[in-house]
Image (spheres, coloured by chain):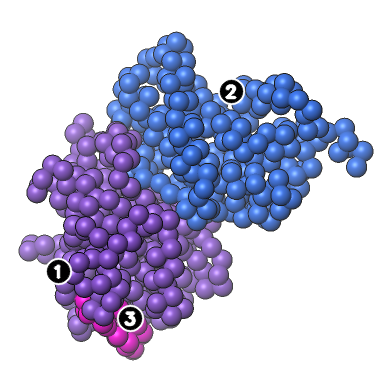
Chain colours: A purple, B blue
Amino acid sequence: MALHERLRRLDDYRELSGFKTEPAQMRAAGPGKIGELRLGFTRRGDRSVLSDLYRVAPLLVQQALYWDEAMPELPICAIISVGGGILQGDRYTIDISVGEGACAQVTSQGANRIHQMDANYASQHQEVVVGADAYLEYLPDVTIPYRDSRFINDTDLIVDESATVIYGEMMMTGRKHHHASERFGLDLLSMSVNVRRPDGRKLFTEKVLIEKGNNTGDFAAVMRGFDAFANIMCLTPPETAERIKARMDTNWLDENPRAISGVSALPNGAGLMLRAVGIESYDVRREVRRFWKVVREEARGRTLPEEFLWR
Amino acid sequence: MADRKKGAKRPKNDMLLLSRLLQFSDSTLPVGSFAFSNGLESALQTEVVTDADSLQRFVEVVLRQAAHMDGIALLHAHRAITAGDYDGVLAADQALWNRRVGEEQQLMLARMGRKLAELSLKISAFPHLERWLAGIKAGETPGCFPIGQAMAFAQLGADEKQAFVVHQYGVAAMIMSAAVRLMRIDHLDTQRILFAAQESVEDEYASVCGLELEEMSSFAPVFDVLVAHHTTTHVRLFMN
């Protein structure tokens, strides 16, 4: 599908209908507002390489680095946002492909900030294709939606049945330390994921939708006063999923936990989903890393090194 | 054909329809709902629910989630079967199943769907449910409960709003039934909460009746953790 076709499809989503005004600054979806990124990883000998790269600002990726001590063959790319965050009228596409037997890690440079908006919205479409026996870790840093921000993200994952992918989003309810009105101050956050096999068989779909005016945000069964949450899926063959699930206890022991989390089965043997909720982004990130470590150990037989001190 | 003639006829008047819908919304309808708490058991263990007030808010969240997920699938299945589009029913069935996370939530959805079909065929002839049940047994369709409800109620002559109401009522009633057995609350309080919880039904219908299957959505992160929590607890009275 051509770039513009994919973005136009998002433009038609019902939840965006109230946000069609043009920004006073650069026009929506104009030159400089469409960020494009294409990353292709293939196996070369004992390690994997970034063999295809196409980028259009404000999205940027530089060379792949190999700094994971437990997986020295793993190319790691950080997505850099030249604009310092997502602005109104921005339109992004991100394509990642991991070839047969290859491995890769894609992350982001820092928190993904969706800036305050007074016109239009920002959208992003991602397509992730993971081939036979391939392994991908795609875990962007936390997304922070500012007050009055509108962001829609649609992600298609096409995953071979022998591949393993860990992918997901960590989210804040807003810039909680900036101002109380930032908490759930966003206008719209719409995050969809569609998982299918290369032959087109649909495995799993999820749409997280937060619109202004939903008064249940602080109910105990929704956020219970917490400010960060994560939905991290592990798409993997059923035997691997079983081993991972057996090692993952639910974390909800303390009276006043910093974070709670648990792992559930996805439908159609697609794999597992980690659900985590916590006070700060790093509390949730700790839960995500616990899951990530087990996924890597069971899927690749390698562990996850300790987090860097400067993170 | 002879069987179909003997089967549940489209009622000539509203009285028979109301009576049949009461039967299908009765909490004693043996479709297995007594075995499920829809997250309440874990909500109590983790103190997300502690008393009548927090129970009421829990039910509100679950009803909202149900409307924006199962309710949309039910409406689409109802429209499809009313238009004679059985493939549309299967599409709604699969779309709902593809969105259900958690092995116990999946179990509830499929077991109650199958039991509803089996029960309906025992008490009368429901040709669409018969075909659907054959598909479930052959592994061709998942058999989600709200899809079975949509087909059963359509055949009884209920319109989509009535089908939606019975579905939403069933979700609330199941949790209240579990609450009486799980927590310190009396039957009067649960009836009061059930009575109040129904007030949202028109708003919920209005907010989802125009949505496509692809627009099924959710947002209840703590509830999602509760779903996972229940699969790893040792002391359990309910299956979810």
* N-terminal label among 3 and 1: 3
Q: Which residue is mark 2?
A: B27
Q: Nearer the viewer, residue A139 or A217?
A: A217
Give the SS element for disc 2: loop
Type of amino acid at the residue the image marks with label 3: Arg
Chain to which the residue tagged by mark 1 belongs: A
Magenta stretch: give its range: A35-61
Give the CA distance from mark 2 to mark 1.
55 Å
Q: Are marks 2 and 1 on the same chain?
A: no
- Residue B203 versus residue A172: which sits nearer the camera? B203
Closest to the observer, A294 or A11: A11
- Percent x, y of residue A246: 39, 50
Give how far across and how far down residue A252 sits, in percent.
27, 38
Distance CA(mark 3)–CA(mark 2): 54 Å
Q: Residue at x 53, y 28 (%)?
A: B169
- Magenta part, dominant SS: strand
Work out whether A258 lies above or below B185. below
Report the amino acid beneath label 1: Gly
Q: Residues within 10 Å of mark 3 (few under 14, many from 20)?
A: some
Residue at the disc numbered 3: A38
The answer to which quarter of the image holds residue B109 is top right
Q: In terms of image quadrants, where is residue A249?
A: top left
* Residue occupied by mark 1: A84
Chain of the residue on which disc 3 is drawn? A
Mark 2 and 1 residues: CB-CB less than 8 Å, in contact? no
Say if A88 sits above or below B14 in the image: below
**Looking at the image, can residue A53 be seen?**
yes
Residue A48 lies in the magenta stretch: yes
